[in-house]
């Protein structure tokens, strides 16, 4: 379809997609060129975790608008947790609740995906792995919180998902510039606060955390080799 009349104002944007209003009570997530392959992936994985009991927007349709692949979801008004003074605690609490659920069989296994890129021997698990859970992906929804962006969902160890969140919050997407150091310190503080809150809620989950921060931190440095805080990441999470 072209120029669908249901598509309203843009209400969000990220590296791989834009989100627009879509009629009454819905949104459409339109994937940017080069990322269209994520549409059916996220449709399947988001539907699976929703059916497993995770509070997240239901998937309604997979569509094409102006040659862009899109997913139609329930609309969650938000705002995200990022603006809340206890954002780290909220994110940790929501994350721990997700990890209390057994992962649906429809999700691919994290250890298999990592083995395919040469990372063997990491501990397996049976929890829902989001892979990119940070305060911007946690949206206020009635009396609770909904989690969005499920294209990276797998079955895996909860500690792997915690490690991914710590490194995403603290380092991912940072670029050099006059304000980079101050932003980095704020994000490190947020990452450490999130980890402390999670450890209080589920202390036994984190026994393998260092193995996972080493593996995922190494991957992050391979994918973002120009990050200005590579030495800090290695010192804190890979080679302490």
Image: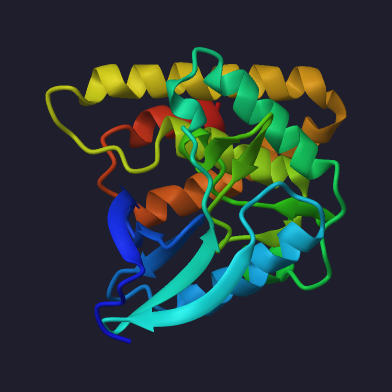
Which residue is nearer to you in this view: 25 or 71?
Answer: 25
Query: Residue at the spot x=38%, y=83% of the render?
Result: 64
Q: How many marks?
A: 0
Q: Is 168 rendered above or below residue 3?
A: above
Query: Residue at the spot x=48%, y=33% of the render?
Result: 80
Q: Residue furthest left?
A: 178
Which quarter of the rendering shows the C terminus?
A: top right
Query: In the rendered image, which quarter is residue 163 located in?
Result: top right
Which residue is nearer to you in this view: 150 or 67?
Answer: 67
Image-based side of 121 in relation to 135, left or right: right
Q: Residue furthest top?
A: 85
Image-based side of 45 in relation to 38, left or right: right
Say if residue 114 shows up in the picture.
Answer: no
- Residue 17 at x, y = what percent? 35, 62
Query: In the rendered image, which quarter is residue 15 located in?
Result: bottom left
- Residue 220 at x, y = what percent? 44, 49
Which residue is nearer to you in this view: 14 or 219?
Answer: 14
Which quarter of the rendering shows the N terminus?
A: bottom left
Query: Residue at the spot x=55%, y=33% of the render?
Result: 166
Which residue is nearer to you in this view: 61 or 69?
Answer: 61
Q: Is 7 rendered above or below residue 169?
A: below
- Residue 101 at x, y = what percent? 85, 48
Q: How is this picture coloured?
A: rainbow
Query: Residue at the spot x=69%, y=36% of the render?
Result: 95
- Residue 202 at x, y = what percent? 82, 27
Say if residue 145 shows up in the picture.
Answer: yes
């Amino acid at each position: 379809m072209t120029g669908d009349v249901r598509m309203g104002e843009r209400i969000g944007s990220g590296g791989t997609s834009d989100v627009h209003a879509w009629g009454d009570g819905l949104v459409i997530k339109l994937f940017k060129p080069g990322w269209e392959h994520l549409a059916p992936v996220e449709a399947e994985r988001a539907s699976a975790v929703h059916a497993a009991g995770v509070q997240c927007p239901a998937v309604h349709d997979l569509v094409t608008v102006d040659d862009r692949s899109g997913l139609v979801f329930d609309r969650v008004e938000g705002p995200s947790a990022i603006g809340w003074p206890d954002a780290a605690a909220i994110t940790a609490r929501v994350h721990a609740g997700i990890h209390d659920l057994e992962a649906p069989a429809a999700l691919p296994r994290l250890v298999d995906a990592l083995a395919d890129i040469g990372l063997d021997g990491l501990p397996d698990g049976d929890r829902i792995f989001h892979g990119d859970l940070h305060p911007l992906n946690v949206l206020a929804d009635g009396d609770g919180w909904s989690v969005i962006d499920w294209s990276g969902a797998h079955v895996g160890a909860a500690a792997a998902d915690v490690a991914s969140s710590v490194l995403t919050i603290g380092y991912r997407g940072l670029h050099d510039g006059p304000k980079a150091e101050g932003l980095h310190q704020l994000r490190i503080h947020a990452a450490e606060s999130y980890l402390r809150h999670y450890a209080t809620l589920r202390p036994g989950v984190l026994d393998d955390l260092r193995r996972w921060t080493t593996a995922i931190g190494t991957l992050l440095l391979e994918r973002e080799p120009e990050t200005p805080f590579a030495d800090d990441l290695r010192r804190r999470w890979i080679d302490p």
